[in-house]
Image: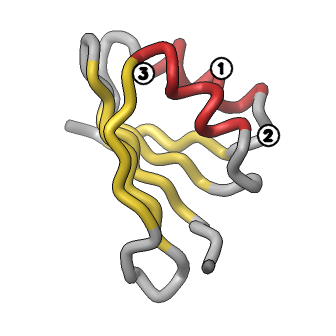
Amino acid sequence: MTNATIIGLDLAKNVFHAHGAPGSGSVVFRKKLARNQVLPFLSEKPACIVAMEACATAHGWAREIERLGHNPRLVPP
């Protein structure tokens, strides 16, 4: 199985969606996660870019994701 080099994370109130892709852009995984599953899920993944839309809670999530060794990126809405 190919490892994702970038993970797109859709932030929400209760249900988050993660989409992983390697450098070629093909789909490695698509996952629906509850709020309490996000950080454990990302802790199992090798260090990569985690992109998410900049919103009210994105900075807090970015700090937590960075502690796991990932490189968080906030994109404008």
Disc 2 residue crowd, few under 14, some 14–19, many 20+, Cα 10 Å = some
The span from disc 3 to disc 1 (Cα, nearest Å) is 10 Å
Earlier residue among tags 2 and 3:
3
Question: In the image, 36: left or right of 63?
Answer: left
The span from disc 1 to disc 2 (Cα, nearest Å) is 9 Å
Find numbered disc 1 in the image and state the secondary structure of the residue it sits on.
helix
Residue behind mark 2: 69
Question: In the image, 22: left or right of 52?
Answer: right
Identify the residue at horizontal 30%, vertical 21% (top origin).
55
Residue behind mark 3: 58
Residue behind mark 1: 64
The span from disc 2 to disc 3 (Cα, nearest Å) is 17 Å
Front of the two marks 3 and 1: 1
- How far across and how far down the image is residue 73, in percent? 51, 43
Find numbered disc 3 in the image and state the secondary structure of the residue it sits on.
helix
Q: How is the image coloured?
A: secondary structure
Which is nearer the eye, 62 or 3?
A: 3
Mark 3–mark 1 CB contact (< 8 Å) = no
Which image quarter is the C terminus in?
top left
Marks counted in the figure total: 3
What kind of residue is marked 2? Gly
What kind of residue is marked 1? Glu
Identify the residue at horizontal 69%, vertical 50% (top origin).
45
What kind of residue is marked 3? Ala
Q: Is 54 above or below relative to 20?
A: above
